[in-house]
Image: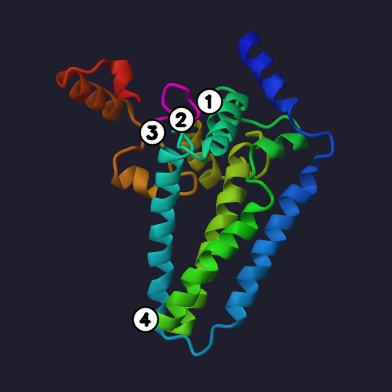
């Protein structure tokens, strides 16, 4: 690692409060999310096959929402949401780069996981949507929506953590984790982070919207921008 990167990394990690404890940060949101998920599952009765369509529909909405937020909020300074941008691009992406992805101590979870209260906000945001789905379609559809939404949140947190574990970790050695981690590692390249690989969980919309980085796609995009009179540097913004 370069001395400059290491100096910036240590300066950001020094901002982690002395009272911070990584285990509650991981365990409490996970347990709360699982509790909401289990309670919702227990309310599903006499499920009809057609109602299961709610699961892939919800997943598609979650994948595109993840893609959009990552691209348009976490890597763009939006009025009123500057703290989210600062935490993500100016801290997370400085501490963890494409050549230095692995966390070195449990305290670095603070730079990987969402704030602890996020799981409550996710539940509160999704509860009215689930209620509307239950009223407008069927109660089972509402509960399936909530189950899928909370499952997506948990998978986001756990996968993101897995991507930043050392590659020698048993979880990191799993084939599917290694494959998805490589997709996320490319996103941590400072040169690519604002234009490529925005899905963190599964790159569904990176694939559909052609933002899954390859040399060929990057070259084609640069050529198009140059033909319109823009520089290669502008083509990455």
- Return the disc, 2 or 4, that comes first in the chain's sequence: 4
Quadrant of the snapshot with the N terminus: top right
* Image coords of residue 98 (percent x, y): 53, 25
Quadrant of the snapshot with the C terminus: top left
CA neighbours of label 3 inside 10 A, class few (<14), some (14 to 19), many (20+): many
Residue under the image location 49 percent in, 90 percent down: 46
Compute the Cα span from label 2 to label 3.
8 Å
Mark drawn on residue 196: 3
Residue under the image location 30 percent in, 26 percent down: 218
Compute the Cα span from label 2 to label 1.
6 Å
- Return the disc, 2 or 3, that comes first in the chain's sequence: 2
Compute the Cα span from label 2 to label 4.
38 Å
- 130 part of magenta stretch: no
**SS under mark 2:** helix
- Return the disc, 2 or 1, that comes first in the chain's sequence: 1
**SS under mark 3:** loop
- The correct choice, above or below, for 57 with respect to 71 in the image is below
Q: Which residue lies furthest to the front in this view?
A: 80
Q: Nearest the camera: 177 or 127?
A: 127
- The correct choice, above or below, for 237 with respect to 59 in the image is above
Magenta residues span 188-194
* Image coords of residue 72 (percent x, y): 41, 39
Mark drawn on residue 186: 2
């Amino acid at each position: 690692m370069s001395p400059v990167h290491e100096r910036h990394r240590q300066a950001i990690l020094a901002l982690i409060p002395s009272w911070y404890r990584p285990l509650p940060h991981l365990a409490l949101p996970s347990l709360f999310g699982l509790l909401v998920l289990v309670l919702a599952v227990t309310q599903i009765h006499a499920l009809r096959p057609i109602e299961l369509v709610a699961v892939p529909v919800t997943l598609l909405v979650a994948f595109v929402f993840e893609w959009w937020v990552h691209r348009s909020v976490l890597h763009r300074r939006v009025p009123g949401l500057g703290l989210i941008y600062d935490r993500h691009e100016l801290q997370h992406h400085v501490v963890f780069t494409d050549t230095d992805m692995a966390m070195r101590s449990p305290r670095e979870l603070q730079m990987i996981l969402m704030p602890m209260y996020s799981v409550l906000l996710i539940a509160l945001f999704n509860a009215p949507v689930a209620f509307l789905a239950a009223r407008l379609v069927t109660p089972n559809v509402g509960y399936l929506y909530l189950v899928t939404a909370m499952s997506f949140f948990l998978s986001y947190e756990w996968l993101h953590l897995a991507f930043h574990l050392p590659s020698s970790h048993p979880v990191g050695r799993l084939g599917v984790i290694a494959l998805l981690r490589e997709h996320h590692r490319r996103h941590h390249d400072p040169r690519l982070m604002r234009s490529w690989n925005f899905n963190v969980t599964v790159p569904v919309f990176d694939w559909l919207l052609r933002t899954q980085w390859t040399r060929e796609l990057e070259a084609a995009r640069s050529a198009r921008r140059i033909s319109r009179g823009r520089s290669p540097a502008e083509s990455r913004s």
